[in-house]
Image (spheres, rainbow, N blue to C red):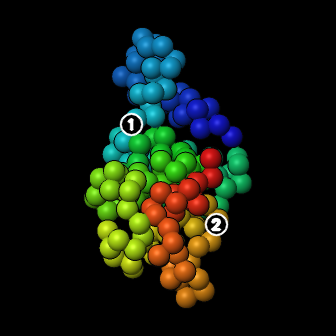
Amino acid sequence: MKVSLILKYVGNKLAKKEPMIADAKKGWSEEDFLNFIAECKALREFEPEFRADIEATLRKRFNLPAHKSIFYNPTAEQWIKDITGQLTEDDILDALSQMSGLSRSVFEKARLSDNTLYLPFIEDMVELFEGATGKKMLDEDGHLWDFLEKYSYRELAHFFATA
């Protein structure tokens, strides 16, 4: 399942629904059109019914389990990657940035033990990442004690990356 093909599907569905999107599709190259669709803010620019329909179609077609989104304000590309579970290290770092309000560059260098974020917040984020990827990091009690001193946020992102 390729994210670019799903973006194309989303773009085609939008073009059928919105005349301005249809005009853009006709006037732009396919690459420019797909880049435009990929950068749309999915939660702000797509109607809830449209998002629900696309999500239900993808989950049914690819037998994907539902989970809470790891993104606070995703682009269409991030939204699709989140639904399909095809997340990169950059996606995980972007999700940390969106949820915390801190610059992504902070997470590029910081360690989990640096007190950049409070431990309960980190554990909540890790729980979201676990739900989205199926990978487990928290212990049975829902804590990260074994990883705090050892890992950076970049390494956390690497652990949860699936693509």
Label 2 secondary element = loop
Tell me the residue at 45%/20% (across/down): 32
Mark 2 burial class by Cα count in 10 Å: few <14, some 14-19, many 20+: some
Give neighbour class at mark 1: few <14, some 14-19, many 20+ (Cα, 10 Å).
Answer: some
- Going by the numbered disc 2, the residue's amino acid type is Lys
* Image quadrant where one finds the N terminus: top right
The residue lying toward the viewer, choosing from 38 and 10, is 38
Q: Is residue 4 left or right of residue 39?
A: right
The mark that comes first in sequence, 1 or 2, is 1
Which numbered circle lies on residue 40? Answer: 1
How far across and how far down the image is residue 63, in percent?
A: 71, 54
Kindly identify the residue that appears in the image at 47 percent across and 76 percent down.
Answer: 148
Of the pair 117 and 33, the residue shown nearer to us = 117
Q: Nearer the viewer, residue 137 or 108?
A: 108
- Residue 144 on image: x %, y %: 51, 79
Q: What residue sits right under mark 2 in the picture? A: 135
